Each structure stands twice: as structure tokens, then as C-alpha cells.
């Protein structure tokens, strides 16, 4: 299959070059060599950045070449310049001739298609027609490029074409605009000369630099969130693994409710942070074996709320803190002035938190069975819990056929005095609640 | 004063339409179109990392100055400035609006001045490329000159951080000017694409930088919630650290690093391991443990290194770098002063007296300098710390650590 694609691309490209050479004029060899060298240079210096921001400078240079050539010599010129795009040095060094032939062929064909469309659609220069022609040319390049590369890349990576496409299609608007920009630069090449390259290279270089800085800071931010979560977990070792599990359940519910990926990410972060209030709770109370007295429970509750309130003074933390707050998690408490999506997040976290609290062993009672946890969630749906979230969680767990709770606990904590078997917990800190 | 914002905006839009219409009649429709482009470009800023922004209109200013005859360009830019100023003022706080408009005026004067200079230097027809490059350079110089003059910190930018944004805008402006001249307006519009991508990527970068700083701010609160440091300490120390770093002329990246590490300087005292509950106990321990957990969490190595060397709570140690000295001076000063401004003089005396090495002396001198120049730094810091205190009213955060003796954990200079 791969071999067939390689032969097809190389042979078709050769045929196109021969036909173009026989029917059209010969392009200026100086221009072909100059642009070909630039394309090769660009192809060999580019580092893959990111699917949605990847910019292929070689593609822009091929488009610029099309504008520099004319209709009579352009098809052959475009094919030759395009073919240089396949000359990737590491491939040459490792003698991977198959992939070399494929890339030279597919770039030559894409570039030829763009040139043909541009010259055909663009009869008289100037005006909107030119803009339209440029857009069509960039699309033609993309269409040929994708239809050849997609099956090839899918075969190489051993993935379905659909998966590869899902990665690729986001980049298409960028490709369209960068392609048109390449043509524009080609059109003003006479006036700009070598400066044209500077005008293209500077914004692209800066774009790459920005993306790399962004990635670095994003990594640092993920790390600082990770540290935060670690500090929360260290505060309350009995619930080690608890936040991770709650995050898993919230993701189940969020996916079941069809939330967008960016919201799922925020939801997951909020779930991981949902115990931030505990940072302000005296450790001896959090880790006290057995039930708390009413007085101790009041202290816990007050400190928990204050901890959340203190952190909520920070903008970014506020959206996290909402999900942590018991007041917002209760379904029948109403929205108040809260934005609807944050309220839903709080509801989701409350259900996930309660489910995990019931299905894990705590200092005052053993884990309950999954069936009892379901029952308890359903019994309080509509009052304490958002019924949609409850059903979403149950559906998601049942579909996966997973088992949690008594007899199925992962990394359950060993207690010095075994907790009693009875008792039904409820959400979050309700877990620590004094005798009802 | 209560104003009806939509009504104000509608009025401004009508005025803008009138001004542009007049320009189209007395001068040229092209001038009106360019003026509209510049004016709307003033409203959209590309955010510069570490603060401030540059209006995308700078690219349009370059194109206008390069493409139109000087008189027309001046008229178009003047109208654009008037229209843009009204719209910017409607949407921004007064001080920021003033800075934005002032800087745009600077770019306009710079761009026009540069094209005039190019025209004077060249005999006969000026090539469009020469005047476009001149205009772009003039616009950058004008903007930077005005942003250096800009009062306060609100919309000011740092030269090094702003340069990439400026260069991108300049390239787009030059390309638009040359393309309009050589190919036509329709095709030239393509040159605006990179601007949109630039705006998106710089925005995303600035966003994540802000979020990181806020998460670090929250991390700085963790030891305070745990009763290991007085509430507001990390926030106040961060204010001092930033001021001293600025006073010493550290760049934005270094300043951000110093502020981050100042906020995190007690993190090593927080139990972080659910198994061992291990904590740092002496000052150098806290620094070492803090650096280790920060590094283990995957934060950048420069943060961890500075945290390790800053040794923020020990006055006796030698500061290996200026950044470390700034962290230590800021943290120690706040430990001495806390939320009582009357402690400032004593704090200054102790910090200056304890400075043993060149770096610490420079940092302490910068702090003294700051007090000589602006007496209310302590007031600002206390205000910054106080915003967390309201939520903590009635709590005994010291009790959070009860069971361990808090006094053993930190060599803290608590005020009696």
C-alpha cells in the first residue's frame, strides 16, 4: 500500500513534468534554482511546532514561486520547485528512497495543481478575482496534498485515516491564509527582492518563538497545579487517591453530559482542586480517628470555608473554588449570581465527591457497596444532588462495567482501629460530619 | 455618574461616521477607508507578555503614512486618532485610554516624520518600499518613545518584550503598503492574516503567563493557610520583591522569577509527603526542601535553583546572586514589618545591617532608595496582603499547626 502510493506519486509527477515540458515554455532556470533551494532550505530547517499552528514555510515559498512564474512557464516551474520540497536531508542520508520519491512527487503534484488553478481562474489581474484565484489555488494545493499524505501518514503510523484527519483539519484555515500570503509575496517580489524573505521569515520566526514560550509557561503552570494538588493530598493522607478518583468521576459525568474538551479540562482541574479548603483545616481534626464532636465539626467547616474564601480572592482560583464549595454544590440551593456553567461544574464535583466518599473506607466507617451508593445518590437527587449528574455518573460507570466500593477498593487506607461497617456518608466534608 | 453605555457608543459611532464621511468628501475615499482601518486598529491590542499591549493599528498607520501623499496621510491619521480616541475612551479606564491614545499619536508622528525624512533624502520619486520601511521604523520609535514617557505602569511596556510584537506589526505594515501599491487592495488584504495569528498567539501566551502567576500566588498562600506564616506575608513580600527588582533594573523575566520565588519561599515548610509528613525545619532546610518539591512537581529549573539559593529566611548566609539577595531582603523585611507600618524603620535598619555581601548590600540599598523616593511602599504592601485577611476573620490559623510546635518550624521574627 505504501509502496503503491510512493510509485503512484513519483510516476504521476514525472508524467506531469514531461507533459508540461513538452507543451509549455521553459521557465527561467535561475528562478527555479533560487526558489527550489529556498524550498529545500525551509523544509530542512522547519521544526514541527503544533498541529494547529504548524506553518510550512516551504509551502509558502512554492506558492510565491507560482506568482513569480507566468501562465506559459508556470506549470513546469511549479512542478520543479515543488519537487525540491521532498529533498529532506535525513531521508537522503538514511537512503529512504521510497519516502523521498513520495514526498517529491506529492509536493510536485500539489504545487502543479495550485499553479494550474491559479492561472486558469485568474485571467485578468487585479481586484477580487485575484483574491479568489489565490484562495482556490491554496485550496487546490491543500486538496492534493491531503489526499496523498493522509493515506500515507495513516499507513505509516498504523492509524485510521479519520484519526489523522482529526489532527490535520484544524490547521487548514491557517494553511489557506499562509498559502495566499505566499502568493501575495510572490506578486510583489519584483519590488521587494530579498526583503520578501525577511518579511515572511520574521513573523514566522516570532510566531514559533511565541509558541515555544507559551508551551514552556503552560508546562510551568501545569506543574504548579500539580504541586498544589500534592500539597492538598499530603494534608489529608486518609484521602490519598481521593482527588484523582473524584477527577475521574467528574470526567465521566462531563463526557456523559457532552461537555466540550476545554471545559472538561477545566472541570478536571477543578475536581483535582476541590479539597483546597482542607489546607486551612487543622490536621489533627482532618485525621482524627472516629467521628468529630459538634464543636470540632464547626471548626472544620469554618476553616474549610475560610480557606476557600481566601483563595477565591485570586481570579484564577475563584473558578476552581466554586466547585469546591459545598454551598454551590447543593442542587436545591439555587444559582444566585453564579454563571450557569460554573454552577454545573460545582454540581458535577459534588456528585463525584459524594460517590467516592461513600465507596471508600473512611476513619469512621468501611466502604459501602456500589449499589448502596447508587441508591443514596438517587434518593437525594433533586435535593442535594443534580439528578442529571447522578444519572450520568451511573450510566457511565455501568457502561464501563466498573466496580467501586466495598470489596473493590484500590489503595484503601489501613487504619489502626478498623472502622465500623455501618453508616451512610454524604458529600465531601459531610464525610467528617458529627453524629447526625 | 451613571451613563448609558450603548447610547454613548451609538453617539460616538455617528460622530465617527460623520468625521470619516467629511474626510471622504474633502480629501479622498481612500483616506477615509484608511482612517477607518487605523481607528478600528487602535481598539484591538496585541498583548505583550508581562504586561501592556500594542494596538494592531500601528500596522495600518505604517501603511497609511507610506501609501498616501503627506497631506492626505496627515489628515487621515488625524481623523483616525480623533475617532479612535473617542472609542478607546469609551471602552477603557481613563489613564489607560490616555496612554493608548498618546502612544498611537507617537506612532503617527513618528511614521509621518520618517516618510517626510525619506522623501527629503531621495530625489524624485520615492520608492514605496523605502517609505514603507521608513514609516514602520518611525512608528516603532514613536510608540516606544511615548511608552517610556507614559506615566505609571498601567499600559506601559518593556522594550525587549515589545520588540517581537512591533516587528511583526512592522512586517505586516510594509507588506500591506507594497502590496496595495503593486497588486491592489483586494489581494493586499491577505497580508493581514499573520496579524490575526500573531494576536491569537501572543494573547494565549499572555493569558497563560497571568494564570501561572495567579496559581503561584495561591501556592504562596498555602503555608499561611497552614499557620506556618502570617496571612498576607507572601503577598506583601512579593510587593517588596517586585519593587526592589524594578529599582535594580532587572528585566521582566528576572523580576517575575524573583516574585515567584518570593511567593514560594515558605513552601518547603509545608508537609508535602503523605507518607512521611516530612518538612524542612531550619531555614536552609526549608529552602532545600522547597526547591526539591518545586523541581519534582516539574516547575522550571530556574525557579527551583533560585529557591534553593535564596535561603530566604536566613540573614547570615551569603547571597550568591543578586536575584537571591532580592528575594531574601524582601522576605526578611516583611517578616520584620508584617502588617504594621511602624516597623518599617527598624526593618530597614536590620536588613541593611545584616547585609554582608555585595549582592545583599545592593538589594538593601535599593530598598532604602525606594523608601526615600516613595514613602508608602509599606502601605501598598499591607493593602495587598489585607485582601486575604477579610475572609480569615475569626479564624485561628495558628491552631492549624497545633500538635506540632510552630515555633520550631520557622525561625520567624514574630512581633510581640
Image (cartoon, rainbow, N blue to C red):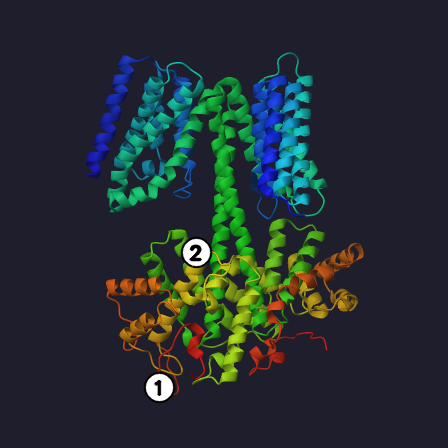
**Viewer-closest of A372 and A205:** A372
- On the image, the x and y values in percent for residue B77 come to 64, 27
Name the residue at 47% across, 77% down.
B276
Q: Residue A420's mark? A: 1
Which image quadrant is residue B108 in? top right
- State which tag comes first along the sequence, 2 or 1: 2
- On the image, the x and y values in percent for residue B377 come to 73, 59
Q: Does B44 sit left or right of B249 as displayed?
A: left
- On the image, the x and y values in percent for residue B239 come to 67, 59
Q: Residue A15's mark? A: none
Residue at numbered disc 2: A341
**Viewer-closest of A194 and B30:** B30
Q: Vertical placement of A58 versus A425: above or below?
A: above
The image quadrant where one finds the C terminus of chain A is bottom left
Q: Does B37 sit left or right of A145 as displayed?
A: right
Q: Vertical placement of B308 versus B35: above or below?
A: below
- Nearest-to-viewer mark from 2 and 1: 2
What subunit carries mark 2?
Answer: A
Dot 2: element: helix
Amino acid at each position: 500500500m505504501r509502496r503503491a502510493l510512493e510509485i503512484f506519486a513519483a510516476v504521476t509527477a514525472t508524467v506531469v513534468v514531461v507533459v508540461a515540458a513538452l507543451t509549455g515554455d521553459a521557465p527561467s532556470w535561475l528562478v527555479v534554482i533560487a526558489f527550489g533551494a529556498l524550498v529545500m532550505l525551509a523544509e530542512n530547517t522547519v521544526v514541527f511546532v503544533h498541529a494547529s499552528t504548524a506553518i510550512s514555510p516551504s509551502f509558502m515559498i512554492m506558492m510565491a514561486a507560482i506568482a513569480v512564474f507566468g501562465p506559459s512557464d508556470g506549470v513546469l516551474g511549479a512542478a520543479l520547485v515543488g519537487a525540491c520540497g521532498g529533498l529532506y536531508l535525513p531521508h537522503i542520508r538514511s537512503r529512504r528512497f521510497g519516502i523521498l520519491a513520495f514526498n517529491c512527487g506529492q509536493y510536485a503534484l500539489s504545487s502543479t495543481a495550485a499553479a494550474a488553478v491559479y492561472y486558469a481562474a485568474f485571467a485578468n489581474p487585479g481586484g477580487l478575482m485575484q483574491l479568489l484565484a489565490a484562495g482556490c489555488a491554496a485550496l487546490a494545493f491543500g486538496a492534493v496534498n491531503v489526499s496523498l499524505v493522509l493515506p500515507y501518514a495513516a499507513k505509516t503510523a498504523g492509524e485510521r485515516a479519520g484519526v489523522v484527519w482529526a489532527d490535520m483539519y484544524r490547521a487548514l484555515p491557517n494553511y489557506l491564509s499562509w498559502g495566499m500570503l505566499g502568493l501575495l509575496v510572490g506578486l510583489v517580489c519584483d519590488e521587494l527582492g530579498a526583503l520578501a524573505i525577511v518579511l515572511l521569515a520574521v513573523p514566522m520566526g516570532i510566531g514559533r518563538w511565541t509558541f515555544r514560550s507559551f508551551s514552556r509557561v503552560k508546562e510551568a503552570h501545569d506543574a504548579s497545579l500539580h504541586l498544589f494538588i500534592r500539597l492538598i493530598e499530603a494534608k489529608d493522607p486518609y484521602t490519598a487517591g481521593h482527588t484523582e478518583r473524584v477527577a475521574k468521576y467528574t470526567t465521566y459525568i462531563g463526557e456523559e453530559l457532552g461537555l466540550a474538551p476545554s471545559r472538561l479540562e477545566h472541570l478536571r482541574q477543578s475536581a483535582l482542586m476541590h479539597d483546597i479548603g482542607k489546607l486551612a483545616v487543622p490536621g489533627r481534626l482532618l485525621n482524627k480517628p472516629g467521628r468529630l464532636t459538634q464543636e470540632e465539626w464547626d471548626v472544620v467547616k469554618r476553616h474549610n470555608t475560610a480557606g476557600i474564601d481566601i483563595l477565591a480572592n485570586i481570579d484564577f482560583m475563584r473558578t476552581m473554588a466554586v466547585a469546591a464549595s459545598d454551598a454551590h454544590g447543593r442542587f436545591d440551593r439555587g444559582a444566585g449570581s453564579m454563571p450557569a456553567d460554573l454552577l454545573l461544574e460545582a454540581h458535577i464535583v459534588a456528585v463525584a465527591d459524594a460517590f467516592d466518599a461513600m465507596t471508600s473506607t473512611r476513619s469512621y466507617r468501611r466502604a459501602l457497596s456500589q449499589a448502596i451508593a447508587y441508591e443514596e445518590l438517587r434518593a437525594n437527587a433533586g435535593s442535594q444532588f443534580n439528578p442529571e449528574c447522578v444519572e450520568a455518573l451511573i450510566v457511565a460507570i455501568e457502561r464501563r462495567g466498573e466496580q467501586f466500593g466495598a470489596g473493590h477498593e484500590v489503595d484503601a487506607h489501613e487504619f489502626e482501629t478498623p472502622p465500623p461497617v455501618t453508616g451512610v456518608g454524604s458529600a465531601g466534608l459531610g464525610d467528617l460530619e458529627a453524629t447526625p | 455618574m451613571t451613563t448609558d453605555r450603548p447610547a454613548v457608543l451609538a453617539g460616538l459611532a455617528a460622530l465617527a461616521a460623520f468625521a470619516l464621511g467629511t474626510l471622504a468628501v474633502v480629501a479622498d475615499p481612500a483616506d477615509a477607508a484608511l482612517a477607518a482601518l487605523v481607528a478600528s486598529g487602535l481598539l484591538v491590542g496585541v498583548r505583550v507578555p508581562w504586561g501592556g499591549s500594542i494596538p494592531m493599528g500601528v500596522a495600518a498607520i505604517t501603511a497609511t503614512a507610506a501609501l498616501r501623499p503627506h497631506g492626505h496621510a496627515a489628515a487621515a491619521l488625524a481623523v483616525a486618532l480623533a475617532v479612535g480616541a473617542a472609542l478607546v475612551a469609551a471602552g477603557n479606564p481613563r489613564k489607560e485610554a490616555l496612554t493608548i491614545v498618546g502612544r498611537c499619536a507617537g506612532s503617527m508622528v513618528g511614521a509621518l516624520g520618517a516618510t517626510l525624512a525619506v522623501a527629503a533624502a531621495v530625489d524624485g520619486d520615492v520608492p514605496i518600499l523605502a517609505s514603507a520601511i521608513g514609516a514602520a521604523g518611525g512608528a516603532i520609535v514613536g510608540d516606544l518613545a511615548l511608552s517610556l514617557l507614559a506615566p505609571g505602569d498601567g499600559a506601559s511596556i518593556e522594550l525587549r518584550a515589545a520588540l517581537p510584537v512591533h516587528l511583526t506589526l512592522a512586517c505586516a505594515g510594509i507588506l500591506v503598503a507594497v502590496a496595495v501599491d503593486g497588486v491592489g487592495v483586494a489581494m493586499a488584504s491577505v497580508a493581514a492574516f499573520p496579524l490575526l495569528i500573531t494576536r491569537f498567539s501572543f494573547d494565549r501566551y499572555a493569558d497563560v503567563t497571568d494564570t501561572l502567576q495567579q496559581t503561584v500566588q495561591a501556592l504562596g498562600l498555602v503555608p499561611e493557610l497552614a499557620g506556618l506564616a502570617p496571612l498576607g506575608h507572601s503577598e506583601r513580600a512579593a510587593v517588596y520583591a517586585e519593587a526592589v527588582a524594578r529599582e535594580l533594573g532587572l528585566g521582566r523575566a528576572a523580576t517575575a522569577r524573583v516574585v515567584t520565588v518570593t511567593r514560594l519561599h515558605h513552601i518547603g515548610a509545608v508537609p508535602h509527603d503523605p507518607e512521611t509528613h516530612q518538612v524542612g525545619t531550619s531555614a536552609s532546610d526549608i529552602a532545600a526542601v522547597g526547591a526539591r518539591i518545586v523541581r519534582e512537581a516539574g516547575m522550571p529549573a530556574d525557579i527551583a535553583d533560585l529557591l534553593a539559593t535564596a535561603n530566604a529566611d536566613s540573614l547570615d548566609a551569603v547571597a550568591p546572586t543578586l536575584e537571591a539577595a532580592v528575594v531574601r531582603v524582601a522576605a526578611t523585611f516583611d517578616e520584620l514589618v508584617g502588617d504594621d507600618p511602624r516597623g518599617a524603620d527598624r526593618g530597614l535598619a536590620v536588613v541593611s545591617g545584616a547585609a554582608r555581601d555585595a549582592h545583599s548590600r545592593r538589594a538593601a540599598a535599593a530598598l532604602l532608595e525606594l523608601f526615600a523616593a516613595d514613602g508608602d511602599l509599606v502601605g501598598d504592601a499591607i493593602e495587598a496582603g489585607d485582601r486575604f485577611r477579610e475572609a480569615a476573620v475569626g479564624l485561628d490559623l495558628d491552631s492549624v499547626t497545633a500538635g506540632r510546635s510552630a515555633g520550631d518550624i520557622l525561625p520567624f521574627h514574630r512581633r510581640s
